């Protein structure tokens, strides 16, 4: 930790500060230059808060942390070894991680009814994807919009899993729903709007379930990793980070701005696996295939893609959902790309997928 | 609602759309110009979602709502009459509203112990302020930072109220704490990070308690009013909107960017009372007095100001807290300003306040 | 300057760096903690570029400057004394500065014709304002929009000055127009879009004329002061900083976001005088009076307000222009406020102003 | 164009407006719903400014353009056909365009001396790239930083072209340098900070030279295309759009935020060719290879990559420059990717390139 004093700080003030730091068990060392003093603090500063130091004196200009504030989420915490999040599903274990095949999560924004979620799951399964996604509880900006079917939708997801063997990823919005969601979901999603809902982070972490942590709309990378730290600090090492587009000054042509350079940046900072959600990031299905490919090239470990049997009739987020046909085509297109980037052979787009897709389209 | 079609949309597509809209009970009217068709939808479109319309056809370029999406929060909903939020406190009813005296809420970031919160409340009371604030549950970016004393802090706040007659404003972060917080608090605060925690909004609204809704770090004004709409739609009309600084591209010299022009903008859009929090907005106590005055000039109905008996020793947000002396001085300075802007005579800064302040400083 | 090395940087690398710094004439001092080394550089680091240091080694994590990068613009450069920019006008010298009366600049967005600019100047003069503003060269986002009348408009401004004795503030957009603009204008404006047009800054500085430097749409405070530094470094000490709203994520209800807390922040950083432009910041005339008052409360030294004899017929920026009547009313309202804040008695809103205003309205 | 009136606008006001629009040669059509009137304007509205309409009445809530404001830059202007920008170079014509091979522009941030620029050009040539970049005039945030060698650097670029046959891309910052820059450069670059320097856009357009137009730091896509429109409107059809990262709320780990989804978005809006600059976007050389691949996957037509014989000693932007070895490796890696995406066989990374690289490294 480094404490930068204002120019012309009285030396008595600096001496007082140094005594204070010594009383905290730290070893302060000073550098002087042009009437400016900088104090370096050697010792265990992890538990010390920047603000605590700042408030020691009005002569403190800035307090800087030399180490990142995240600890368990840091790459250094695992000595540079990337972690794997292994999720058991009826079809077998699926591993999220830097040296593993690309994991594909697909499905509709919301679970609408049994037929649609089971059929979508069958399509998703047929393309070789490993997880079905679908919202039971939906965060909607309007109280008058469809809020999700709640508990009953969770049971429909379970039926889709039974029918296909796919794992389930679904969002939890309220700590009071956690037990139920964690009982059914294979991966519990915390959405962008709840990224700093610290109660939810702690309690979701405590379930022990793998957690998919979406980046907040205007969350810095550091804040995002600190949110992950909440889950990790609750004793749960299974966190997957999902970039889903950030808010910028321009929302005219895309819903959000997909920040793909987070992938290489996160590789330098954290051992946690990474997912990209091009559907929410762009907000328009026509941009999803291109950005899916760009995400693979950027090195993502997994992808979350919205697909709906009939986007026009979707109860939410229709414009960003691929049709079954588009999804099958995309899965075919990305197979060689995933292989090129060392992300495994995807058993994609079999005849069954096409048939399933055709069936859904005519439905 | 207005539906703008892409150039050269086939007329059959437009005809299909028009039939669809008619089946929804709407009256579509079209305008044609340069191979472009715009469809105006007349009828009750409040319950219709922009996305639902968007997904009807890939030829739809844009869907625009002519009315604002918020209804109960809109100024029109009350025919242009501004609402009053009346909060009973031991010292009598306090009214938040456009034609009422300025309401001052002050206190520390966190409730630390009985002595500090009671003494701070006495200071706050002595200056003529009406509410004591203080966090029992604290949203902190790090899991290793002080998280608030929780339930026990709520009881200390109640003691501070007993001792002074001030009302209590404190934050709730988890739906499972709502009953307890609502039982003790006079106004329940929903913080910036939970502004789109829709479960919390609904359940907090259902308590019937007055709700202080802080604006999210990157929430648009429309999103903020839609969050208020969640509370209003749950049957609770007592919502106060609090601007506390937004996130911009520059965080070097202030913690957030105080968006003061929301005050006149909100006056055009909503009937709800407004509060400004210059402490969180700027993040530095030295900027709080100036921005407090600017907030009064902008027309705010109330202010939330952090004051701590000893900011240097504060467990959180010390740098943005005023000292008792600074707070007393500020209250003296703003009294004539409040009066000038028709916001009542504040019974500020009596000898007792100065004495109380002196007592705290020497403590 | 402080150089933070990555954890586990080899000691040979650090030794090499230290040698390099010594060869630059600096005295490096190191602090070690948890396998992390921080190097403090003592000596004259003003001429050294952060990037130059950064590129010395891939093991460098971060390079921090202890001092601000701006020098001539810094408050320390004048030992804490605020500067005054004195502008001679036919009506006498006008001084911009922290301990001087509020300076009011008003006028239309563009100079449209002789009658409108002369009559507006008469109105502006009658209210007690000191400068007429008006664009001869207009930065417009569309090449098909009115681009300003150019040179001929400069001559019309000169006529307005002759008729009223007011000073002239007008924008220059191209270095090739500088000589002409500087010859006529009393203060040369560099607009937001040209804040980092470094050629223009240098050459405008070299004219010796007082420069009004508007903040760029997404310019950090540091970048803004560095732009001022370009002018100061060219030997011209007469710079006024103008905040005119920044770009944020929300543009639905205001054109830009007025960042009023820059006023107290700039007071800590720089000696230069400050102006606020509430017209461009909000983009709507209905918000201008309120934000003008808030700007005065925030401590601004001067204000730039758009007024147009007939905003509905304005060739540019009509919606943000006050009518003559509204302007006169605003000047009357702010007079006591300016006085309250120690900004002098404004000789505002005489009968003549009202008459002039009435004349313009009926014209 | 659509004019949305405020609720309860008096019908006389609407009638007056309709008369006004008729006098402009337009055909107004109205839609009424819930005391709200919307006026659709049929006719030639291209020359009409949104603001002009807005200012017609205070009862106007919003004015919307049904068509995009850019005309020559729009895809519709060329009936959906993408344009090609053909640049003659000593090595032959190079074509930028959607159905052409990837064009690679590489070189140092600044031209430092003859040896470095000629040797870098030889390396760039050997890898199969088509253009050398290098700044003669450098926009630097500090007046004390290296500002580029100016005119003499232009002559060094010409020597590098002579030696290699590569085309030259270099930036112009001042209209007074345009003749000289245009005489030597094969493509004239307008930098991010000058994207709305409208004088420069007009005059650069008038030179007839191909223009590389970088996106401004906080320019919306629409503003960027309107800047291109300035060049196109001056009669110059040869514009290439270059995304180089935008400014967001997070600058901690990357210099800017690379907005890759602009590539598919621009394909929907404009016929102009697209370039991506991952060096400026990320600001760190370690992220450049990954984001280069992601850019190719996103469908870019060309890339601008910084390479420097010795980044540690670079006079500017060293941290974002690749070393010769890294550049050669990257060119080898992207060759199959470019081919996979139908962007031609790149004659990359021959023995000569490796040798040249080796030579530079040992230099």
Image: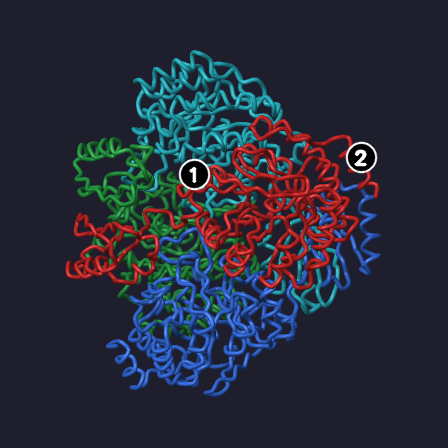
Chain colours: A red, B blue, C green, D cyan
| Residue A17 point in image, percent of width and height | 21, 59
Of residue A42 and residue B64, the one placed in the foreground of this image is A42
The chain identifier of the residue carrying mark 2 reads: A
The chain identifier of the residue carrying mark 1 reads: A
Q: At 24% from the left edge and 54% from the top edge, which residue is drawn?
A: A26
Crowding at dot 1, Cα within 10 Å, few <14 / some 14-19 / many 20+, comes out as: some
| Residue D343 point in image, percent of width and height | 59, 23
Same subunit, labels 2 and 1: the answer reads: yes
Q: Is residue C158 above or below residue D101?
A: below
The quarter of the rendered structure image containing the C terminus of chain D is top left
Q: Is residue D284 above or below residue C276?
A: above
- Where, by quadrant of the figure, is residue C20 drawn? top left
Of residue C136 and residue C274, the one placed in the foreground of this image is C274
User: Is B115 on the left or on the right of A31, as rendered?
Assistant: right
User: Is C20 on the left or on the right of D177, as rendered?
Assistant: left
Q: At 45% from the left edge and 87% from the top edge, which residue is drawn?
A: B91
Of residue B255 and residue D220, the one placed in the foreground of this image is B255
The answer to whether residue D255 is seen in the rendering is: no
- Secondary element type, mark 2: helix
The answer to whether residue A325 is seen in the rendering is: yes
- Where, by quadrant of the figure, is residue C338 drawn? bottom left
Q: Is residue A49 above or below residue B185?
A: above
Give the distance between the C-alpha atoms of the residues marked 2 and 1, in whole angstroms: 43 Å
User: Is A10 on the left or on the right of A69, as rendered?
Assistant: left
Q: Earlier in the sequence, mark 2 or mark 1?
A: 1
- Which numbered disc covers residue A355? 2
Of residue A231 and residue B261, the one placed in the foreground of this image is A231
Q: At 48% from the left edge and 42% from the top edge, which residue is drawn?
A: D246
- Which numbered disc covers residue A268? 1
- Which numbered disc covers residue D187? none
């Amino acid at each position: 930790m480094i404490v930068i004093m204002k120019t012309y700080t009285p030396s008595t003030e600096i001496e007082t500060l140094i005594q204070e730091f010594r009383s905290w068990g730290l070893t302060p060392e000073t550098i002087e230059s042009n009437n400016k003093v900088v104090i370096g603090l050697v010792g265990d500063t992890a538990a010390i808060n920047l603000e605590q130091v700042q408030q020691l004196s009005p002569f403190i200009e800035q307090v800087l942390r030399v180490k990142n504030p995240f600890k368990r989420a840091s790459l250094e915490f695992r000595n540079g070894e990337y972690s794997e999040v292994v999720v058991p599903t009826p079809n077998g274990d699926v591993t999220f991680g830097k040296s593993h095949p690309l994991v594909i999560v697909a499905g509709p924004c919301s679970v609408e009814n049994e037929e649609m979620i089971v059929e979508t799951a069958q399509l998703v399964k047929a393309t070789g994807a490993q997880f079905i996604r679908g919202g039971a509880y939906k965060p909607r900006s309007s109280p008058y919009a469809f809020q999700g079917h709640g508990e009953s939708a969770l049971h429909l997801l379970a039926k889709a899993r039974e029918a296909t063997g796919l794992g389930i990823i679904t969002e939890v919005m309220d700590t009071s729903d956690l037990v139920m969601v964690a009982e059914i979901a294979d991966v519990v999603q915390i959405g962008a709007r709840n990224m700093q809902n610290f109660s939810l982070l702690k309690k979701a972490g405590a379930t022990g379930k793998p957690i998919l942590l979406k980046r907040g709309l205007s969350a810095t990378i550091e804040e995002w990793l600190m949110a992950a730290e909440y889950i990790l600090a609750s004793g749960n090492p299974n966190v997957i980070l999902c970039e889903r587009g950030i808010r910028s000054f321009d929302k005219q042509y895309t819903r959000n701005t997909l920040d793909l350079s987070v992938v290489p940046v996160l590789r330098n900072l954290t051992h946690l696996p990474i997912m990209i959600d091009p559907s929410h990031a762009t907000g328009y299905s026509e941009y999803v295939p291109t950005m899916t490919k760009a995400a693979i090239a950027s090195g993502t470990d997994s992808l979350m893609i919205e697909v709906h049997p009939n986007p026009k009739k979707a109860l939410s987020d229709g414009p960003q959902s691929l049709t079954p046909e588009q999804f099958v085509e995309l899965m075919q297109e990305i197979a060689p790309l995933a292989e090129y980037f060392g992300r495994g052979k995807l058993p994609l787009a079999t005849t069954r997928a096409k048939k399933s897709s055709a069936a859904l389209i005519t439905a």
